[in-house]
Amino acid sequence: MSGKPNWQGERTPRFDIAGVRGELHRLHEACHVVADGDAVGAVSGGRATDEDGFELLASTPAFPPGLLGSAAFREAHGVRLAYLAGAMANGIASEELVIAMAEAGLLASFGAAGLAPERIASALDTFAAKIPGLPFACNLIHSPAEPGLERATVDLLLDRRVRLVEASAFIAPTAEVVRYRVAGLERDRDGRTVARNRVIAKVSRPEVAELFLRPAPREVLDALVAEGRIDALQAESAARVPLADDITVEADSGGHTDRRPSTVAAAAVLRLRDRITRELGYRSVPRVGAAGGLGSPEGLAAAFAMGADYVVTGSVNQSCVEAGTSPEAKELLTRAGAADYAMAPAADMFELGAEVQVLRSGTMFPMRASRLRELYRTYEGLDDIPATELSRLEKDVFRMSVDEVWRECLDYLGTRDPAQIARAAGNPRVKMALVFRWYLGLSARWAVRGETDRIRDYQVWCGPAMGAFNDWAKDSHLFPAENRTVVEVAEQLMHGAAYLFRLRQLAAEGAVLATPLNDYRPAPRPS
């Protein structure tokens, strides 16, 4: 005997590449790397022993995907995995997508942003009928240009008793997101504050994260009490809990993004969370998740290794069968590479200069939208734009006269937000912004509806994660869009991340495995 431990068990170690890979994939069992002379193999189960057997080189315990991230996240939201399929506006994160995830014991957020209250109500009624008691979230987006819409959305969420929202695009807490949170505060038998209405706040910057990690602002609470929209006891209870239960740190994502590296943004918010928790003595520690650029197992594994309590995917789900967008848009997404993206003006915050990250390949939207921004910055109104430039816009971008565009704006805003029409009446610059926002808003809807004559104007919110996913899924069953289901994508990404964690654990014990084993590609998962 050499004094080194050996391995014994009922299974026979595998020494061929395919066999070793299969053993490593048995994530619900302990795995051992063993040697038989110069041959290195792997086997699941069994035990270390001083008796005769295969030489034991390294061992790793069972590490199924359900161990990644925070157990508190899984328990709070009633899910199997610390994973969220994030909201995608205009119903792209559709009812079908949310229901599929909920029925699989996973969490998804309905893409309510950009939808009329009647459409949101219909979706919430569908969830109540088809997935009662199962986990789901609904997006609540900050709407500075349409505050009435934000308020109407919160009215619906409270009326339908939706217990989880994903709040996005907020630069500071508004009365509506505070009202939603505080309306669900109660006291338990021991007098402790319990938050029935949970908030996942999606942020890009630490200074915004801090506002959601702290209790709701006193001045906002006082105003809500004065208006009779919350009561004094709820306002008092709000001082004991953070405004959000979970903070998603959004890095280089599709849509609204600062394109900051996740290693910088998430690390800063994790430190901030720990500092504020110590300062305020929270009973329940707010959780921090990572989003943006997550389209491969390597990306998810890196996020969890950095300390993320959960991960959020977005772009990759947009190409899935259940996504509420057109086959034409999905086809463009499946062809996207790692660098096929650009920043373009945001329709909802156009006047503020906000941008969104969109798909660049296969569409001219980023270039045309950027031209509209240049014109807005240069001229005080439509009448100031040179005739040749205006004619080019009407012919190539709007495909109708400016007067016709304005009539459509009047028809739309007349029922949705008449106040904007009044603002434009005496301000040519406001009118110009509304005309340009007509194109910015409709371009996203053309992509969702699959209007083929407008394919060169498709606005598809997307980030580099889509290219990472396509590269990873190449030559696998997940490459064709018709095979991409949101649950299969989630399971494959999380399984791959856990597999990579297993390899790192074995490597830390000195196990040297064949190079092909370091790459996990989508494949049927072992039972």
Image: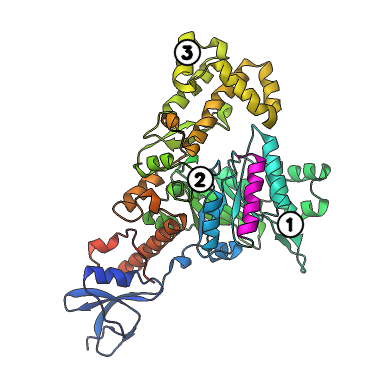
Sequence order check, earlier mark of 2 and 3: 2
Give the quadrant of the C terminus. bottom left
* 172 or 318: nearer the viewer: 318
Q: In which quarter of the image is residue 77?
A: bottom right
Mark 3: few, some, or many residues within 10 Å (few <14, many ≥20)?
A: some
Percent position (x, y) of residue 441? Answer: 54, 31
Magenta segment: does it hold 272?
Answer: no
To which residue does mark 1 refer? 185
Q: What stretch is highlighted in magenta?
A: 115-131
* Residue 220 seen anywhere in this rendered image of the structure: yes
Find residue 134 and name its label.
none
Find residue 391 and name its label.
3
Percent position (x, y) of residue 202? Answer: 56, 47
Name the amino acid, label 2.
Gly
Q: In this view, does 274 lie to the left or right of 452?
A: right
Mark 2 vs mark 1, CA separation in Å = 34 Å
Find residue 324 and name its label.
2
Mark 2 vs mark 3, CA separation in Å = 34 Å
Q: Is residue 238 left or right of residue 85?
A: right
Mark 1: few, some, or many residues within 10 Å (few <14, many ≥20)?
A: many
Residue at image coords 24%, 74%: 41
**Circle 3 sits in a helix, a strand or a loop, which is it?**
helix
Residue at image coords 37%, 34%: 362
Q: Is residue 304 above or below residue 28?
A: above
